[in-house]
Image: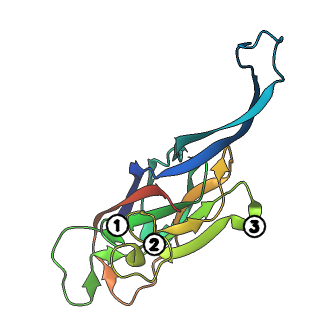
Amino acid sequence: MRASAHIVIGIFGAALLATQASAQAQLQTGVVYSSDQAGLGAPPPYTGQLSIPVTAQVTARCGFAQAPNGSVNQPDFDVNGIPQTDFAFQLECSGPSRVAITSQNGGLLTNGTVPTGYTTLAPYNVELNVVANDSNDNVNDTCAAAELNAGNTCTFFGTATETVGAYVASPSVGQSGSYVRVSAPVYAGVSVLVDGAYSDILTVTLSAAP
């Protein structure tokens, strides 16, 4: 029996969140003189105050400075497993953000018939590690690929929005060390894997989060 694994990972989009901030300029003081109508010389100065409200819009910056992408190929993964393989990335988010991942197949999948006692789907694991400017807000979690295809049991499952995905509570700008890691132990399932080329696609998305 021979089973080879091929996993592709990529970034397919990022969402940006616009925020507004306002500012007010207070107490601009000046001196005002009236005309000398009585011919008595210049009158005393009169002090006035001018308050000018100033408003501006600030757009939160959130994207990938370096996107996670690439692939891993592992022949005979059923007997060799898949060693830990990292796909590095770097965020460029000036505020909180969310990172999410989906799996196309929920595991390593191959085509073909499935005789009794066999299977065409093999499990593997996905680890998400995000480094924030404040190390207290770093994110790390590991989920089975099956959890990234359906359901909501994984903290980083889905397509990232303001409310979906692993929450990074502080900005992350210029921080190295973030990665998506894939791995699998030697296959130990009850059903036997059929011969074939197994594959999956992981999609990583990012969104600013209020």
Percent across and percent down for residue 16 are 44, 50
Q: Horizontally, is 77 left or right of 66 in the view?
A: left
Image: 166 above or below 21: below
Tag 3: Cα neighbours inside 10 Å, few (<14), some, or many (≥20)?
A: few
Nearer the observer: mark 1 or 2; the answer is 2
Q: Horizontally, is 141 left or right of 34 in the view?
A: left
Q: What residue is at 19 percent from the left and 81 percent from the top?
A: 114
- The circle on residue 64 is none
Task: Determine which residue is flagged by label 3.
Answer: 136
Dot 2 falls on a residue whose secondary structure is: loop
Percent across and percent down for residue 14 are 42, 50
Mark 2 to mark 3: distance in Å? 29 Å
Mark 1 to mark 3: distance in Å? 45 Å
Dot 3 falls on a residue whose secondary structure is: helix
Q: Amino acid at mark 2?
A: Tyr
Q: What residue is at 48 percent from the left and 70 percent from the top?
A: 156
Image: 97 above or below 18: below
Image: 67 above or below 142: above
Q: Horizontally, is 153 left or right of 111 in the view?
A: right
Task: Determine which residue is flagged by label 1.
Answer: 2
Task: Determine which residue is flagged by label 2.
Answer: 124
Q: What residue is at 52 percent from the left and 50 percent from the top?
A: 20
Q: Amino acid at mark 3?
A: Asn
Residue nearest the observer in this picture, 207 or 89: 207
